[in-house]
Image: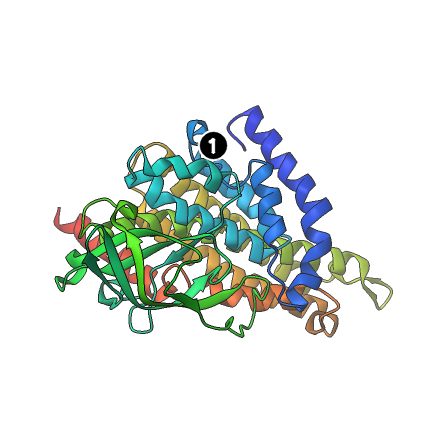
Amino acid sequence: MLPTPEAEELVALTRDIVRKELAPRAAEAEENAAFPREVFRLLGRSGLLGLPYPEEHGGGGQPYEVYLQVLEEIAAAWASVAVGVSVHTLACFPLFTYGTAEQKELLPDMLGGELLGGYALSEAQAGSDAAALATRAVRDGDAYRITGTKMWITHGGEADFYVLFARTSGDGGRGISCFLTEGAMDGLSFGPPERKMGLTGSTTAQLHFDGALVPASRRLAEEGRGFPIALSALDSGRLGIAACAVGLAQGALDQAVAHAADRRQFGRPIIDNQGLQFLLADMAAAVDGARAAYLDAARRKDRGLPFARQASVAKLLATDAAMKVTTDAVQVLGGYGYTRDFPVERYMREAKVMQIFEGTNQIQRMVIARHLAKSATA
């Protein structure tokens, strides 16, 4: 149930764009590992890249629960694009939340899709342990000189800007600062795109900073505030990935049901077999349960309530559900499901990374447990 008629129209618009523009391109783009930059421009010009941000900055002024349901619609057809929208929304969060009025003048182009963003946090030895990052930002007059390597960066080499987290002192998590960097600048180079199992239409690459000079005016908030910024952004980003996972699972379920209704063996559709009915019912229950989890967390966020634990729960449930539902969809299609002539094998490959990025599901369990322990001693 969407909260307003405007939200219903927005989701209907998304479905129309997905059906006409995204779904016909997805399989070929994924097969060729082609980054769909023009699709992000289309979504931006359609008002779908800045939905949870205020209209005064060029956003859509929509609650998070609406934005996530739009994201789910995109993911059901093309997960790479949905993940890209989620990452771009994540990359806009630090500027919107912590930027000065002058810095926020960049937001309209970012939210309108003219500028595409990346989120540069992870490193070789600082993935789940983000406070251990080693990339350094050393003050040099009115700028900072950046040295270090970032890994697993979505839109690496494709983005127009990156939200960069770098160490400005040796004081652990309190020594990290946040910067808004250009996508192309002297001293910044990129590794070759990672050769991934899935999401091949979404470029993932290393960022190499070799003394790149970033103006001090591009630092967001005070020095040493970067780690809290990163964590608060990730709480919202996990909801984006949860919605992507639910959309992916819904797409797989739709394919499985359609095939089971059409495929006939022993004189009747295979969907009439109770064993298959039970499998499909479990798949549907997993999708519905995961959707309810991310919507619960989103509504808490929209009301200004704490939602970090609920975001981790939603990310955990939704991505585990996506892995199981897509695997079961391949089983429903049998030999057909194992071929690239049908999309469910791609959905299965894409589901795996959902359990890994934005904090592995093992990390989500740690986050949930810490919240439980904190509430028990409060």
In the rendered image, the residue lying farthest to the top is 5
Element at badge 1? loop
Whether residue 257 appears in this view of the structure is no
Amino acid at the residue labelled 1: Gly
Please report the residue visible at 38 percent of the width from the left and 34 percent of the height from the top: 302
Q: Is residue 139 left or right of residue 195?
A: left
Residue 217 location (% of width, % of height)? 27, 45
The N terminus: image quadrant: top right
Toward the viewer: 161 or 271? Answer: 161
**Residue bearing the label numbered 1:** 58
Whether residue 276 appears in this view of the structure is yes
Determine which quarter of the picture holds residue 363: bottom left
Q: Is residue 82 left or right of residue 180?
A: right
Residue 157 location (% of width, % of height)? 48, 62
Residue 143 location (% of width, % of height)? 24, 53
Toward the viewer: 253 or 190? Answer: 190
